[in-house]
Image (cartoon, helix red, strand yellow):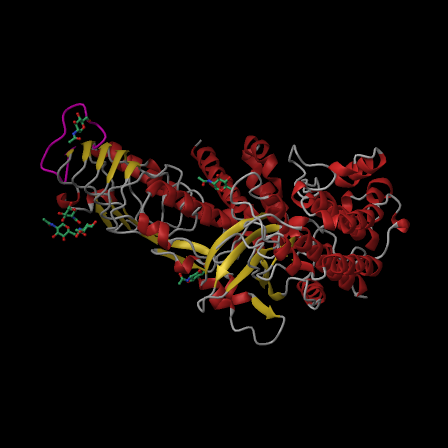
Amino acid sequence: MKFFKLLVIVFLVVHDYLVAAQDNAEIIIGFTEDERNALLALKAGFHNAFLDENWQSFNCMNWYGVRCNGSRVVGLTLESLDIAGEIKVDALFNLSVLSVLSFRNNSIFGQLMDFSKDMELSRLDLSRNNFDGVISPSLVNLVRLESLQLQENKLTGAIPWFDQSSLKELNVSNNNLSGPIPNTRTLRSFNSSSYDHNSLCGPPTSTTCGPTSHVGDTSAGSNKSSVDATLIIVNVIGSIVLVMLLISFYKKNKQLNQKISERNNVIREGDKEKLENDEEKGDEMSSTVIDHQAKGLIQEGKLVFVDGEPGFELRDLMTASAESLGKGNFGNTYKARLDDGRHVTVKRLRDLKPLSRDEFLNHLKIIAAQKHPNLVPILAYLHSNDEKLLVQKFIMNGNLFTRLHGGRGTSDRIPFRWGARLAIAHGVARAMEYLHMNPNSSLVPHGNLKSSNVLIDENNMPLVSDYSLTLIISNTIAVHRMVSFKSPEYLTSKKVSKKSDVWSYGSLVMELLTGRVSILSVPQDDKAVDLCTWVHRAVREEWTAEIFDLELMVQRSAIHGMLKLLQLAVRCCDKVPEKRPNMSEVVKEVESIKALNLDSDSEEDLSFDRDQSQSPTDDSISATPSR
Ligand SMILES: *[C@@H]1O[C@H](CO)[C@@H](O)[C@H](O)[C@H]1NC(C)=O
Ligand SMILES: *[C@@H]1O[C@H](CO)[C@@H](O)[C@H](O)[C@H]1NC(C)=O
Ligand SMILES: *[C@@H]1O[C@H](CO)[C@@H](O)[C@H](O)[C@H]1NC(C)=O
Ligand SMILES: *[C@@H]1O[C@H](CO)[C@@H](O)[C@H](O)[C@H]1NC(C)=O
Ligand SMILES: *[C@@H]1O[C@H](CO)[C@@H](O)[C@H](O)[C@H]1NC(C)=O
Ligand SMILES: *[C@@H]1O[C@H](CO)[C@@H](O)[C@H](O)[C@H]1NC(C)=O
């Protein structure tokens, strides 16, 4: 019967470990994403200006009071910071290797946290706060707990049955605890100074317990504590068995409940499966669960710099303060500020093909070797077990999508004139032509050309980004998310080619000309339209005049060039890939339109300024969002 119970306990613990293992599969620079999120949730509850300021860089080593080992948070010490916020009961679930936690001398309120996932916890200090409710029973299971300081809070209820031999320091004084102090060797080892100023009874307090309190009874106590001692021993053995079980059950999580019902022979079965599965699963386990604490990014990852002298190192990147630029299609993007004030863009790559380290590095080498004035330069990249990063030059003025569609109908909107749009169409075409001439490129050299992947620099020149990622992104993800796989040829014959990029370019130019939101940029937007189809229909049904963005229509002299560019875009969008021009032809045509522009306006962009001097807001040059 006892054995049966113990097995259930072991299995519950195993289950928790499995859940924890899954939670921590993803690693962010410096610490896991789950842990970072857990800390951000804490910060949100604390409303503390100091933390808000000091908890934001990439690397947890720069977070005040946070101590990391490798990529895991092992210590959290926030003492005397005037934190007056609330903490959630499950706040520590995802900080599962936490060893030291101190919130001493703040005004934190709420119930005590649930520590059942924090098996490594050895020192816990929550003294001098406003915690209420009972002392969490989960603390009883922490076999590494050495010091527990809960004095000067508003805790109520009885003291749980602490009997872990690890516990060497305890203070629960100055609370509102009541009832007998449980008779365990551990709790008896402390003198009354640990228990003072509560309504407790029994030794070591001077109050004797009333006749109804049987918990402190000696015979029952020793009986219970011997059972508990057995529990601990088996728990320790359990933890050892656990690692083995973990290995064999890792992929069998779903069957776990079923396994519990067969618990009587489960250990034997587990052992057998361990032997059978060890070889094939060993690797996977070591990278996800067992080694995750030891393998910090710094130790194992090395930044590969594209151009020799970069002027920064991984260490600088890790200590840089970072600001999220958003969740990209293939991972989050951050703007990091290096110590010298420079900014770089850091992209965490996700959803990659199952490439070996060498394959990954080779592909990145090919991608990063592509250099053109209209491509966003890649400065460095990194491959580690946990993390794949792409470090790019930070481009000032946002992306084309925002430039085209942002601030419409508001006074902040700076009109985006023909000359500037044509310059974008030209720069993008040149970048694409360059990519298409690379003999090492993949089937579809860019693969994901859309307005949000065209960045605009301080001179309002376009720089194309996120190029050639088809080489490394998993095929299934690419098919779902990349623009080339929305092309007519992919939909009908599952084929993509350079001409799929040409199609994307055509669509991008239509977005430039119409000012309408393309469905390729934001598939989920109601206002978004399939521009190739829409323009085709507009041309056929002769409502051509309504095609162009009203912001362009004020420039009468430009209409000829706009029509020419529209014709080019329509050809790029042809359903039949072979009928589309190649990128070199496109570049030539755009250049001839630019020349036309020069002819009609004598001096392209500058002439616009002069032409539009009657309207003070007209400024095709300053696409910069004012200031
Ligand atoms: C822990 O991480 C998991 C997985 O990311 C998440 O779903 C869960 O909400 C997190 N729990 C807490 C309490 O933060
Ligand atoms: C508690 O924190 C306050 C500031 O919040 C500080 O002034 C005080 O000295 C601290 N007391 C102790 C005992 O640490
Ligand atoms: C202590 O708890 C009792 C109920 O258990 C309550 O009546 C009393 O007000 C509490 N005292 C303080 C100081 O919180
Ligand atoms: C109680 O124990 C603490 C810590 O072990 C010690 O500092 C203190 O002197 C003891 N008090 C008495 C009255 O024995
Ligand atoms: C427990 O905490 C109180 C302050 O609340 C202190 O006076 C007492 O000495 C502490 N006792 C031990 C054993 O740490
Ligand atoms: C970091 O973790 C590893 C593996 O868990 C351990 O061996 C090492 O002692 C830890 N280092 C520190 C500084 O805690």
Q: Nearer the viewer, residue 346 or 457?
A: 457
Whether residue 33 sits left or right of residue 602 in the image: it is: left
Residue 253 lies, in percent from the top left, at: 59, 39
Q: Nearer the viewer, residue 41 or 616?
A: 616
- Residue 528 visible: yes
Q: Residue furthest left?
A: 206
Whether residue 54 sits left or right of residue 300 in the image: it is: left
Q: Residue furthest top?
A: 212
Q: Residue at x 73, y 58 (%)?
A: 426
Whether residue 184 sits left or right of residue 594 in the image: it is: left
Q: Does 573 appear above or below 73?
A: above
> Which residues lie in the magenta part?
200-216
Q: Residue at x 55, y 46 (%)?
A: 246
Q: Nearer the viewer, residue 119 or 307?
A: 307
Is 340 one of the magenta-colored residues?
no
Dominant secondary structure of the residues highlighted in magenta in the image: loop
Q: Does 176 appear above or below 561?
A: above
- Residue 469 visible: no
Residue 262 lies, in percent from the top left, at: 57, 32
Residue 336 lies, in percent from the top left, at: 49, 60
